[in-house]
Amino acid sequence: MQERVRSSGLNSMTPRQGLSQLEAAMASDSVQLGVLNADWRKLVARRSGDDTPAYFSALTGAGGGISRKSNGAAANKTQNLRELVDAAPPSRRPSVLRNYIRDCAIEVLGQKDKGLLDDQTPLRDFGLDSLLAVELRNSLSRSLGTSLPATLLFDYSTVGALANFLWTEVLDGSTESDRSDAALTEVQTGSAVLTSVAEMSDEDVERLLAAKQ
């Protein structure tokens, strides 16, 4: 647990450091004050969205914010999920989505045995708490390029349920290739109808129009 917290950017303090910060806080005129031993670059990199808001620039040491695209490992994990699913054969797309979600959950949870995380067991049984739920939701939001509900991991608590929601509600149960194939079929069907009409005699066309009235 401590290693997972450190990997998110939060570090512990020694008793001496804690007392020193307490002394500074008591001497401060601030009405509200918090003390963290934080790696702000790591913490900010876990936010949703492409770029850090400007007000974090003083903490991260980057003017105007830092781009998450320069955060090597995170950038690899936040590849475009729509493109990943679209590139797979149609019959494989739902399983590609599930596998991606499972891999993201394994990374967030710090699981070492991938075989333990199945599609039907609630993620909270593997240690998913509210903070990790936010982290997983943000990771999926970045990979999809869209915001997801704040209660996503509570409404859809398993890999299977989460995959079904994203497939039907976010990816519309289809990908660009599916829609292109459907459009092509429609065009081909329309062409066939026009060809059929062109081959009909004037009398047949008149009878067909009369029947439609």
Image (cartoon, rainbow, N blue to C red):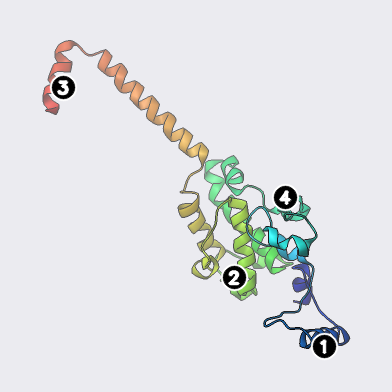
Could you tell which of marks 1 and 3 lies nearer the N-terminus? Answer: 1
Q: Give neighbour class at mark 4: few <14, some 14-19, many 20+ (Cα, 10 Å).
A: some
Give the number of the mark in front: 1 or 3: 1
Toward the viewer: 92 or 4? 4
Tag 2: residue type?
Leu
Q: Which residue is mark 3?
A: 208
Gap between marks 3 and 2, in whole Å?
60 Å
Q: Which residue is mark 4?
A: 69
Give the number of the mark in front: 3 or 4: 4
Toward the viewer: 153 or 42? 42
Q: Which mark is residue 23?
A: 1
Q: Give neighbour class at mark 2: few <14, some 14-19, many 20+ (Cα, 10 Å).
A: many
Gap between marks 2 and 4, in whole Å?
28 Å
| Badge 3 vs badge 2, beta-carbon distance below 8 Å | no
Q: On the rendered structure, is 207 left or right of 93?
A: left
Dot 3: element: helix
Gap between marks 1 and 3, in whole Å?
92 Å
Tag 4: residue type?
Lys
Could you tell which of marks 1 and 2 lies nearer the N-terminus? Answer: 1
Could you tell which of marks 2 and 4 lies nearer the N-terminus? Answer: 4
| Number of on-image labels | 4
**Farthest front residue in view:** 29
Tag 3: residue type?
Leu
Q: How far across and down, in percent of the image, does residue 140 sit?
A: 60, 57
Q: Which residue is mark 2?
A: 123
Look at the image and tell me in which quarter the C terminus lies. top left
Gap between marks 4 and 1, in whole Å?
39 Å
Tag 1: residue type?
Glu
**Farthest right residue in view:** 16
Q: Which mark is residue 52?
A: none
Residue 160 visible in the snapshot: yes
